[in-house]
């Protein structure tokens, strides 16, 4: 020990002795003799060397000067050193030798709030020999010493002698602990020391609140992301606890350690803990909103405290989590959704990362806050990053706590894929946790589906795994599709995880080096950084790799382009020879009148049999087509133009549902019946993964154009049949008798009208096929051959169907309305074929009967009446044809 340290030690010891002597002056009978004896003993005592101090009480022979500082008995000099010493500051040889663990009760890790004795002559009866020095009887120097010792307990959430729990704080209540401890300070404390203590008290509140948060969020239901965040926060708490232990060591070893020095050492942790607490309080205000004290209760308690005039640590620390949340949102300029009662639910997964990322971006100008939140974010994002890497590289989704942005519908299994291989598996097996997913869940719940998950509507927003961090928002669709593509390949019987197999090597090729580096980090359990550009590059390359592999599978193994050519053959009648055979063979079934809402299965079976026979004939062009057996016969619920007009006129799902319900009610009321041929349409059955391109939605788009072309073919065939019937000798013979002139003019009107209708139908058919479909199909073939991804392939196919539909003017409601009426007029004309023949026979009979009478004065025969069906058909044709031409 140097001379300077020795001199400082003596001065410190003398100050402590002097302050203690003043406290004991009132209880010592022979005050002057004792003081004189103590002064003499101070001069005689040698100064011992400083030695390491143990942390637990141990029997030792203390120096005489320190032994006389036993302030628990009036007769200090006659006290037996070997007697057991009570656990009190007054009965310890020195505050320097007081072990930290000696103040902690054995029954619990925290002292319960209770009344404390602040005077030596009024000890607390609940703890024997418990004596606390009255701060009014000591000077500021000793108060500094006592408060340093007290603060070492308070900083870790244990109440001290002079800093105790507030009366409205309940240590055993979870909500109070989550809000942080509240302390009251002894009124007799020196004002300057009080200011320092009040500066440090928020640390205790932060520590208690964060510790309670970690205790609550350790359950399995909070997810792996929350567990990782708690682990990162525990590392910060460990640093803080180590700092408190270092302060204790300095207190035990250095006589110059003061409250000011303690504040200088703890001050940096105040900013760190305030940032951590702002995150934990925001999460706790949502997840544990049911246990947090209500604001009205806190206000009442604050009013009581203000009336009592007691001092609290609330001056420097706002322990109300809801108020902290409002202040945080106001500081960051965020929308104040908190005022709208957005509480409840569990914060986990992507929502935790979104909170950290928002703070990280908004507080980028604060280096300390940015670095802290960046560290917390990177640690908390590790489970999420590994989950994402596993999904985009192998298609495996391991998300037991619903933290990831992609959700799997376990009800859509391989069995459902075999029964309905078109859209069900691809659309619903894997989805984003977005509004569409929750809308489906709500609809299933309303429909009484027992397997439907409960939808958390407590906060009225996307929460948990549905909340995607802002930096991943632009990549969410590629993340979803990358995993879906890999699962599509797996469903074809290819194990994508076996990178050494020849099949995987053929489809995927070698793994990208950039992606491989991230997989190596994952395998070694090293940190995966998600917030840099290289991770975005990893997502892009993994997506491209899965995309290219699935495209190779579709083109080479599934021969998707040949399937589309087969679809064009049957739906757009590129080679329509099979259609004539089918219509001839199934004419009897096609002439039947049925209820569109209740079509018999036997009708479809007979039509399917006739179609298979037509396609199986060696005379047809499509006999060698390997996919002809996938063609199916189907009957729609309404006519072609009625369907197109409904779709063109209806905007939105709600209006569609209302219109369908109204039309169905009208049909049930009126009992509408239709001819089978006008409901006829073709369908196709494809297997997965071909259904990714030829999906049900795309088949419906093919059917829009197909039904119009089929209607043109049927009307052309019907008009041709009318022409064939009217080429009979009776129709071809011209009656030159004068009274037969009206009949001849009537026949000519029928011939002209039939020819005009046939010309219109043939012109529309030629326009649709030669001017629209063939050029667009040629462009589609070129684009499909050049496509480098499944997305491009599907987009080209989708654009082809939409372009053809628009160029055929099947999206214009007025055009469809006009065409519907014209087609109905032509249909009425063809269906009146028998009526025309009957009327012609009646007119011929009337003319023959008039001439057989031989009475030329008789009135001319009435051949055409006012209710002639031809007049009505001509009027309708002239009206709508004129509008269509305009």
Image: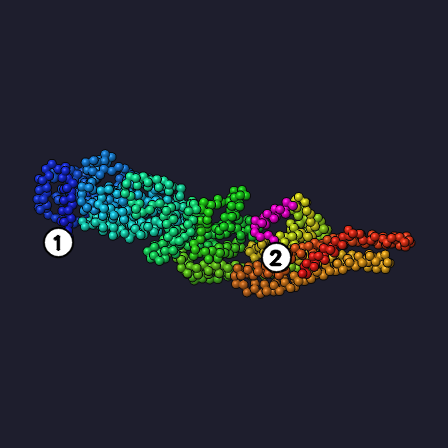
The mark total stands at: 2
**What residue appears at the point 67 percent right and 61 percent down from the top-left corner?**
886
- In this view, the mark in front (2 or 1): 2
Question: Which residue in the structure is indicated by mark 1?
Answer: 3
Taking 683 as reference, is 212 left or right?
A: left
Measuring from the top left, give residue 497's x and y in whole percent: 47, 56
Tag 2: Cα neighbours inside 10 Å, few (<14), some, or many (≥20)? Answer: some
Taking 145 as reference, is 227 left or right?
A: right
Taking 374 as reference, is 262 left or right?
A: left
- What label sits on residue 811 in the rendered view? 2
Measuring from the top left, give residue 728's x and y in whole percent: 81, 58
Q: Is residue 31 above or below residue 803?
A: above
Q: What secondary structure is marked by label 2? A: loop
Answer whether residue 233 is visible to the viewer in this image: no
Give whichever of 718, 744 is nearer the camera: 744
The disc, 2 or 1, on the residue closer to the chain's N-terminal end is 1
Give whichever of 827, 790 is nearer the camera: 827
Tag 1: Cα neighbours inside 10 Å, few (<14), some, or many (≥20)? Answer: few
Give the extent of the magenta segment. 649-666
Q: Label 2 vs label 1: CA separation?
A: 101 Å
Give whichever of 630, 34 is nearer the camera: 34
Measuring from the top left, give residue 22's x and y in whole percent: 14, 41
**What residue appears at the point 30 percent right and 39 percent down from the top-left corner?**
307
Residue 816 sits in which quadrant? bottom right
């Amino acid at each position: 020990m140097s001379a300077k340290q020795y001199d400082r030690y003596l001065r410190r010891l003398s100050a402590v002795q002097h302050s203690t002597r003043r406290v004991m002056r009132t209880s010592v009978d022979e005050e002057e003799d004792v003081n004189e004896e103590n002064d003499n003993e101070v001069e005689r005592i040698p100064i011992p060397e400083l030695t390491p101090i143990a942390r637990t009480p141990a029997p030792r022979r203390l120096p005489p000067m320190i032994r006389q500082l036993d302030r628990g008995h009036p007769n200090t000099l006659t006290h037996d050193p070997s007697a057991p010493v009570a656990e009190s500051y007054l009965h310890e040889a020195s505050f320097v030798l007081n072990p930290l663990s000696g103040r902690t009760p054995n029954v619990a890790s925290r002292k319960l709030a209770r009344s404390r004795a602040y005077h030596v002559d009024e000890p607390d009866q609940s703890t024997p020999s418990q004596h606390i020095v009255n701060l009014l009887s000591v000077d500021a120097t000793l108060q500094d010493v006592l408060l340093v010792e007290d603060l070492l307990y308070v900083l870790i959430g244990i109440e001290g002698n002079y800093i105790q729990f507030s009366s409205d704080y309940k240590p055993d209540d979870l909500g109070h602990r989550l809000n942080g401890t509240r302390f009251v300070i002894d009124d007799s404390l020196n004002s300057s020391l009080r200011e320092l203590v009040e500066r440090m008290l928020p640390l205790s509140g932060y520590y208690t609140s964060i510790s309670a948060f970690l205790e609550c969020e350790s359950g399995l239901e909070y997810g792996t992301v929350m567990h990782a965040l708690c682990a990162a926060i525990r590392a910060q708490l460990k640093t803080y606890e180590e700092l408190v232990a270092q302060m204790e060591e300095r207190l035990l070893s250095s006589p110059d350690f003061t409250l000011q020095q303690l504040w200088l050492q703890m001050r940096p942790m105040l900013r760190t803990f305030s940032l951590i607490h702002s995150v934990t309080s925001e999460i706790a205000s949502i997840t544990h909103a049911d246990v947090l004290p209500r604001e009205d209760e806190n206000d009442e308690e604050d009013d009581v405290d203000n009336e009592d005039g007691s001092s609290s640590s609330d001056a420097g620390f706002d322990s109300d989590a809801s108020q902290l949340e409002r202040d945080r949102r106001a500081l960051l300029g965020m929308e104040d959704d908190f005022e709208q009662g957005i509480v409840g639910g569990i914060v986990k997964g992507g929502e935790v990362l979104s909170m950290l990322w928002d703070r990280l971006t908004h507080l980028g100008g604060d280096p300390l806050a940015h670095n802290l939140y960046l560290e917390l974010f990177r640690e908390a994002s590790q489970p999420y990053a590994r989950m994402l890497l596993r999904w985009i590289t192998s298609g495996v989704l391991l998300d037991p706590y619903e933290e990831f942005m992609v959700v799997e519908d376990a009800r859509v299994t391989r069995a459902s894929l075999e029964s309905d291989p078109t859209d069900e598996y691809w659309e619903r097996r894997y989805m984003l946790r977005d509004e569409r997913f929750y809308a489906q869940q709500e609809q299933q719940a309303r429909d009484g589906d027992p397997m439907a998950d409960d939808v958390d509507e407590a906060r009225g927003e996307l929460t948990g795994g549905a909340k995607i961090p802002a930096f991943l928002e632009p990549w969410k669709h590629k993340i979803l599709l990358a995993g879906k593509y890999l699962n599509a390949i797996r469903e074809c019987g290819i194990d994508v995880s076996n990178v050494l197999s020849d099949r995987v090597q053929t489809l995927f090729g070698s793994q990208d080096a950039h992606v491989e580096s991230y997989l190596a980090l994952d395998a070694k359990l090293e940190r995966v950084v998600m917030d840099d550009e290289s991770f975005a590059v990893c997502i892009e390359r993994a997506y491209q790799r899965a995309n290219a592999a699935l495209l190779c599978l579709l083109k080479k193994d599934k021969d998707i382009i040949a399937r589309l050519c087969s679809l064009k053959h049957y739906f757009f009648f590129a080679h329509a020879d099979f259609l004539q055979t089918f219509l001839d063979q199934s004419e009897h079934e096609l002439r039947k009148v049925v209820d569109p809402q209740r079509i018999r299965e036997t009708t479809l079976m007979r039509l399917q049999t006739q179609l298979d026979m037509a396609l199986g004939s060696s005379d047809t062009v499509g006999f060698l087509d390997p996919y002809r057996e996938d063609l199916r016969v189907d009957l729609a619920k309404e006519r072609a133009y009625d369907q197109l007009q409904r779709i063109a006129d209806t905007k939105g799902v709600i209006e569609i549902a209302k219109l369908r319900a109204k039309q169905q009610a009208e049909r049930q009321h009126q009992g509408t019946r239709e001819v089978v041929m006008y409901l006829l349409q073709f369908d196709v059955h494809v297997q997965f993964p071909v259904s990714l391109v030829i999906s049900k939605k795309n088949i419906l788009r093919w059917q829009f154009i197909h039904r119009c072309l089929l209607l043109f073919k049927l009307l052309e065939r019907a008009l041709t049949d009318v022409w064939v019937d009217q080429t009979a000798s009776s129709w071809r013979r011209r009656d030159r008798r004068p009274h037969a002139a009206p009949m001849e003019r009537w026949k000519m009107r029928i011939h002209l009208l039939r020819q005009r209708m046939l010309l219109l139908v043939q012109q529309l058919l030629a326009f649709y096929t030669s001017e629209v479909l063939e050029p667009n199909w040629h462009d589609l073939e070129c684009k499909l051959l050049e496509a480098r991804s499944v997305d491009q392939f599907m987009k080209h196919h989708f654009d082809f169907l939409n372009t053809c539909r628009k160029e055929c003017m099947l999206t214009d409601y007025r055009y469809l309305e006009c065409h519907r009426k014209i087609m109905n007029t032509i249909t009425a004309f063809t269906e009146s074929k028998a009526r025309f023949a009957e009327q012609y026979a009646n007119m011929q009979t009337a003319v023959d009967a008039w001439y057989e009478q031989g009475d030329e004065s008789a009135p001319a025969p009435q051949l055409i009446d006012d209710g002639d069906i031809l007049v009505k058909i001509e009027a309708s044709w002239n009206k709508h044809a004129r509008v269509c031409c305009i």
